[in-house]
Every structure is written in structure tokens, then in C-alpha cells.
Image: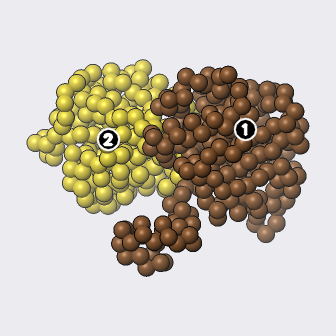
Amino acid sequence: MIGTDKKYEAIVIGVSAGGLEALTVLLCDLPADFAIPIIIVQHRAKDEKNLLEEILQAKCKLTVKQADEKEQIEPGKIYFAPANYHLLIEDDHSFSLTSDTFVNYSRPSIDILFETAAEVFRSNLVGIILTGSNSDGAEGIKKIKDFGGATISQDPASADYSYMPQAAVNTNSVNQVLHLNEIKKFILSLEYYGHKI
Amino acid sequence: MDDNKIDALHNLGKIILKDEVIFEKFVQELTINVTEMFRDPIFYKSLREKIVGRLATYPFIKIWIAGCASGEEVYSIAILLMEEDLLNRTVIYATDINQKVLQTAREGIYHMNEMQKYTQNYIKAGGKNSFSDYYMAKYGSVLLNKSLRQNIVFSVHNLAMDKSFNEFQLILCRNVLIYFNQALQNKAINLFYDSLCPFGFLALGNKESLLFSDKKKDFDEVDRHEKIYIKKN
């Protein structure tokens, strides 16, 4: 199994249709002292404000928030890309938002988050693709793998929408194809590379 | 930059400093010009409900739209002002660093296939008429009405280098500052402060704020969500 002998600086997750349910399963049992920052692109309506964060915050023990422009990534937090902006990671581990054109019909785009995260965190990054019906994230998964990070896809057969995890699997860059509960166990087994909170 | 057969980054630096044509082309490659009409309809609604009434108290209204790209936002503001019967006593200064997109903005011709989205935005923004009243469609494009364009001045302005050029009651600079580092953001906000009349309004993008600026205390929030601020006296 990958990951057990290594330490990680961040986990990035890309998810589209069926996301709320999958994220609830994945995130809500994480303990309050889980240190590795989790950064998520969930495709969402462009005029949606904060609903997704509010729903998950009500159920999660970790802090759930929308990533702000120039905000520093901190341990123990779950960040979401805001609606209608791409989310990028900078070299100094801060967030950048852009209103560039749509990528894979999406803004925020999973590929953009994954590719910039891969360049910054290199092999200390975990990339996860969950349910969705768009191929966004497949290129990003490839890039994470190229930089030596760990790549995981939800098992397409068990996902609510199989297209997105299948597109990731088809790149041959996915280390492991797992059920949601196995992904959760995997996340819990990871060690944080950085100072403890 | 492949077109100009520039082989190394340090050569590019030398060349763009000396060659104005290549510099302009470089700016065009580098700048991001994504925009739409009535983007963030709730913002326009807020502008209509909270700001327009105060603008109406001025006999002559000056508005600066900084970083206007291809002009969609400029015409959205012009439409809003026309519906509020203010356009005929307003001058809108629309500026951008990129001369090519400014030319598109001046022409006021856009793709037909965007119009469905813009119409939905317009309705959500509280538009009072039928959106199709504002343009003429032909050959897969739309031409915005001349009446919208009569009081707009399009001009090149570089937020990083150029100074204030007038005094305004409203400045819009939406989704431009996110591309700046903190020092440059601060400089731009100071420039806006210097360019606003007392009680003038500043509108930023949804994910932008005055948080990191040393002028934070010199503005009050008018609409926290839509990032509309008023300059204190």
C-alpha cells in the first residue's frame, strides 16, 4: 500500500456530481487533530455562496472554509474552491484565485488545482478523484503522478457517477482504485509532513 | 513569443524593453481578459438598490471602470444607468492595459452565442426591460446600441504605473486585483482612494477585499458580500 511510509503536505480532492454525499462520508469522521490540509474542488453553481461549506461544517470536526485570495494554507483545515473562480496553489503555500476562462467546462477546475498543487508539493501530495460526470481532473492526476505524489480514484463501479473516476483510471496514473470507506481509511493512515498543530 | 524567435528568457527581457510593438504583443499574451455582461448579477442588483440613488444626487457623474477588458462590464453599467435615467449625465472612463481588447470594447460587437447567458444574468440583475432592446443581431454577432456608447471614454491605463487622472464618484475594479501581489494591490487601492471624491464608492470583485491594504480604515463597507465600499470623508 502506498503512502504508509511517507509523509504528506496536502491532500487535494476533485469531485463533481454526487459530491456532497461522497464528501460527507469521507470527511465527517476525520478527527479534530487531523493535520494534513485538505483542498477540494467541488464543481458547483456559479452563484452559490457558502452553502456547501456550511453543510459540511455542521457535520465535520475540522474547520471547513472557502479558500481566500492570498490566504496561507494551514494544517487542520478543509478548504473549498469558491464558485466561479479557479483555485491555484502558489510556491509559498498560499492560495490564488483567478477568473480565467473555463477548463473542462468548469470553473473551478480540478485540473488547475491538481496541476498547481503537484508543482508545489511534488511527491508529498495525495490526489483523489471522486464521483462526477466530466473528465476534469484526469490531467491533474497524471501530473501528480509524474511528480511522484500518491493518486487515488474512487472505484467507478461504486461511485454515484462513474464518468469522472473512470476518466482518471483511464490515464493509467492512478495508484489505487478504492471504495469510499477504503479511501477514508487510507486518509486516516497518512502522516503529516510539517509541524504538528 | 515563438513568433518572434526569441530563444531565451533574458533576451526577451532586453527586447520588450526596447521594442514597443513586441512589448504590446507581450502584454496581449500575458493579460487575462475573461469577462461577461452582468457577471455576478447580485452585484448589479446591489449597485442598483444601494448606490444608484446616491449617484443621482450629483449633477454630473463620473465613473471609472479599471481593467475593463473587452468592455462587457462597461456596457452592463451603461445599461443599468440608462434604465435609471442617469446615463445622459454620466461619463464612464473605461481603462485597460491591453490595447487590443480596448479596441473590441470600443466596437461593442460580441458573439451571439453568449447572449442567452447574458440575458439570464440581466434578468437576475433586476433589468427593467427586454435585454434584446439593447442590441442588434446579425451575422452571428450582436452590435450594442450606439446610445449606450455615447458617454464612454475608452483609454489605455496601467494600474501598476500610471497616476490618477480624474475624480470619480464610483470606481469599479472587479477581479483585477486577484492577479496582483500584495504590494501592487495596495498601490492600486491607494490610487483608487486618491481618485475618489469624499463618499465616493469603490466596487471590487467577490473574492477581493481591502483587508491587506493600508487604506482599510479609510473605507466603510456598504455591501459586505458584493464588496462595495464607501470612502470616508
| Residue B225 quadrant | top right
Residue placed most toward the observer, A66 or A162 = A66
Chain B image colour: brown
The picture places residue B72, in percent across and down from the top left corner, at 70, 51
Identify which residue is drawn at 77% across, 62% down. Answer: B107
Other residues around mark 2 within 10 Å, as few (<14) / some (14–19) / many (≥20):
some
Identify which residue is drawn at 19% across, 27% down. Answer: A196
Which amino acid does the dot numbered 2 rest on?
His
Q: Is residue B3 visible?
A: yes
Q: Are marks 2 and 1 on the same chain?
A: no
Disc 2 to disc 1, C-alpha distance: 39 Å
Please indicate whether residue B203 sits to the left or right of residue B110 in the image. Answer: left
Q: Which residue is mark 1?
A: B167
The chain letter of the yellow chain reads: A
Q: Which residue is mark 2?
A: A93
Which amino acid does the dot numbered 1 rest on?
Glu
